[in-house]
Image (cartoon, grey):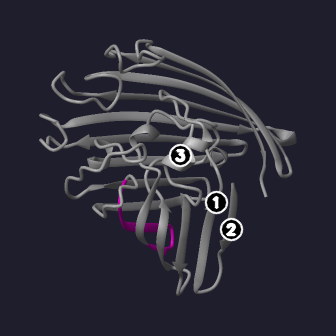
Amino acid sequence: MRIGRKIDGLVQYYVQAGAYSMPDLGAPYIRSGKATANFFGALPVWFLKLAPNDSFSVQVGNLPTLVGAESTVTFQNVNIERGLLWNQENAINRGVQANYTKGPLAVSVAWTDGFFSNRYSWLWGSATYTIDPANSVTFTGGGSVHTESVSSLATPLLQNNEQIYNAIYTHTSGPWTIVPTLQYTSVPSDSQLGTTHSLDTFGGALYATYAFDGGYSLASRVEYISSNGNTRDPTLLYGPGSNAWSLTITPTYQNKQFFGRAELSYVKASSSTAGFAFGPTGTNTSQTRLLVETGIIF
């Protein structure tokens, strides 16, 4: 994937172009050819940015989401795979976003199409307060303002009609970067969605990275997420009332533009329903993966 950008002057831009895959825990792996064609196309992120001053800007185009602690593409994150919380979040949305910064406070608001639905019905907000150079806290929230029936690989019906809220704390100390986060989502009771009750998830994650000398680092992630529901409703996880936890370890080596890394991940689901969990038949209650990724950043 190639990235182009202009980050100064009144008119700025950002472009990501190329093929990609988005491996994530607890879900089948989708090869890059199918992922590129069925998710966001070969130009997944692009936007124009008008910045009349250093404090205020407006972006229009295919925008990265405001929610969550993880980005969309593998090389943008400390782990190769996205996590269990990311499975409830959108990744890229079409729309317009305004940003304002004053002192330690940075605020963004956006009007978008949520999970790439091409229906502009989502309102977002994000606020980050930088306590000091080593500590910051971010609160994000958003959701659909009315029911949408669009459904595709990029636009899951339930998640595209949810409300979602995140609290993220970031701490750096020497070689350590530690990021705890909490997340809550809620899908309303709506006959158009097939839900007779609201469907909720609540989860938390802890990301920790230690940077060694010589270009080596070790990243880890531990997560837990739970859901409600009953047998008359669709499910957001691995069956009504299911929950899951995960552990991911990712050692990385980088030398100038070259990087290589391996990853071991484990997911365990509880209170799952046969057919909704892991494996070819959806009956396995755990998933273990070993991945390797290498590339050149330029």
Inspect this view and state whether residue 161 appears.
yes
Q: Main secondary structure of the magenta part?
A: strand
Residue at point 64%, 37% (across, down):
80
Given this view, does label 3 or label 1 mark the residue nearer the observer?
Answer: 1
Q: Is residue 146 above or below residue 204?
A: below
Instruction: Tell me which numbered mark, 2 or 3, is placed earlier along the sequence.
Output: 2
The CA span between labels 1 and 2 is: 8 Å
The CA span between labels 3 and 1 is: 19 Å
Question: Residue 210 falls in which quadrant of the image?
Answer: top right
Residue 250's spot in the image, x, y percent?
68, 31
Contact between labelled residues 3 and 2, with CB atoms less than 8 Å apart: no
Q: Which residue is label 3 attached to?
A: 70
Instruction: Tell me which numbered mark, 3 or 1, is placed earlier along the sequence.
Output: 1
Q: Which residue is label 2 attached to?
A: 4
Residue 34's spot in the image, x, y percent?
55, 42
Instruction: Tell me the amino acid under the disc marked 2.
Output: Gly
Contact between labelled residues 2 and 1, with CB atoms less than 8 Å apart: yes
Instruction: Tell me the amino acid under the disc marked 3.
Output: Glu
Inspect this view and state whether residue 21 appears.
no
Residue at point 53%, 77% (across, down):
49
Tell me the SS state at disc 2.
Answer: strand
Q: Which residue is label 1 attached to?
A: 17
Residue 140's spot in the image, x, y percent?
38, 55
Residue at point 14%, 34% (across, down):
197
